[in-house]
Amino acid sequence: MAPVVRAIEETPSLSLRLIHTDQHYDQELSGSFFEVLELPNPDDHLEVGSGTQGEQTATGLVGIESLLVDREPAAVLAQGDTNAVLSTALAASKLPVLFGHLEAGIRSFDESMPEEINRIVADDVADLLFAPTDDAALNLRAEGIEDGVHVTGNTVVDACHEHASIAAEKSTIHEELGVTAGEYVVATIHRPFNIDDFDRLGTIIQQLSALHCDVVFSAHPRTQEALVRADIPVADTVYIIDPVDYLDFLALQSTARVIVTDSGGIQEEASVLDVPCVTVRPNTERPETIEAGVNTLVKPSDITATVNQLIQDDAAHEVMTGYPDLYGDGESGARIVELVRDAI
């Protein structure tokens, strides 16, 4: 949302109030972003924290509704597919306020994923739907949603463009970890179906441990807890690190040989940064990356073979690069804010 925040601040006719749900409540997961990206501090904190799907959604719904009633904004914007987005959509849909959903129309077509339900409901009640791609807009049309749909690109592209050079200049993460550009793999695994199944998580770690280079594994607190509970052995070549700030992580991604992930956003960032992506999932809501050949879906048991080929075979590696503009031109934030301004 940083590009949108900046674009609002640069629009004289608009003012901004920033709500932090605290669903990502860890300092490393969210707090440092405001400082590193030079964003204004949140005006309100909801302290949603962890909990079940229902607990997070309900707590967010009560808090967001109260703020919207109190502040009476012209519009409220939310991005992505978290429970916080669902809470915002439900609260706004019952009040006289425009709701704008960023990343509208993204679909994995797997309703066993909580994120898919969140996306579908948010889009169904949204007034302004900012689709990152033509395919996302087509998904909305197939669901009977056409009014208020705008193909804007994704602000993840803006963020990468704005900060990649700053990260390269300021980050010292390579020296701190002792890794060399182009000679390591970045890994992130955090989705419940990968970490709550200890057999599956164990296979993922085993496969990462067998790679022919170092692995920097930026581990969500829940992932680290699962590794401890399951007592899963980790090879010396796999560096389990706490989440790092945005610039450091951007620097790590930018010069990785391969990225292994189950994150949606990181699939996009990998394409923007021209780094091959291996996604440990049966499906993806970023099909454009698969169609372009810059991302591939794998089972946990196939990680080693797939990634080792990309490490060792330059031709195979090159084939999985070359499409940095799949999700826009880097002007999505300004485009979205202009549409919001016109709508209100």
Image (cartoon, rainbow, N blue to C red):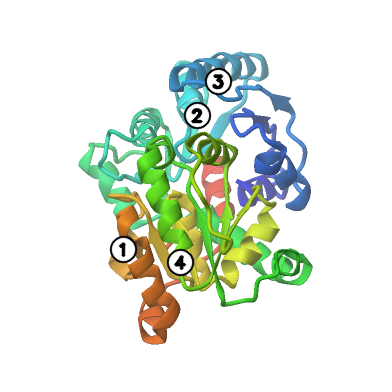
Which of pointers 2 and 1 indicates the residue nearer the eye?
1
Q: CA distance from mark 4 to mark 2?
A: 32 Å
Amino acid type assigned to the residue bearing label 1 in the image: Ile
Occupied quadrant, residue 301: bottom left
Occupied quadrant, residue 65: top right
Q: CA distance from mark 3 to mark 4?
A: 32 Å
Left or right side of 10 for 309: left
- Whether the residues at callouts 2 and 3 have beta carbons within 8 Å, the answer is no
- Whether the residues at callouts 3 and 1 have beta carbons within 8 Å, the answer is no
According to the image, label 4 marks what residue?
271
Amino acid type assigned to the residue bearing label 2 in the image: Leu
According to the image, label 2 marks what residue?
98
Image quadrant containing the C terminus: top right
According to the image, label 1 marks what residue?
290
Please state the horizontal and vertical placement of residue 219, each as a whole percent of the image: 57, 47
According to the image, label 3 marks what residue?
60
Which residue occupies the extreme bottom position in the image?
315
Task: Determine whether 271 is above or below 249 in the image.
Answer: below
Crowding at mark 4 (Cα within 10 Å: few <14, some 14-19, many 20+): many
Left or right side of 190 for 165: right
Q: CA distance from mark 2 to mark 3?
A: 18 Å
Occupied quadrant, residue 40: top right
Check disc 4 and report its element: helix, strand or loop.
helix
Check disc 3 and report its element: helix, strand or loop.
helix
Task: Determine whether 301 is above or below 33 in the image.
Answer: below
- Whether the residues at callouts 4 and 1 have beta carbons within 8 Å, the answer is no
Crowding at mark 2 (Cα within 10 Å: few <14, some 14-19, many 20+): many
* Disc nearer the start of the sequence (2/3): 3
Name the residue: 35% across, 44% down. 105
Which of pointers 2 and 3 indicates the residue nearer the eye?
3
* Disc nearer the start of the sequence (3/4): 3
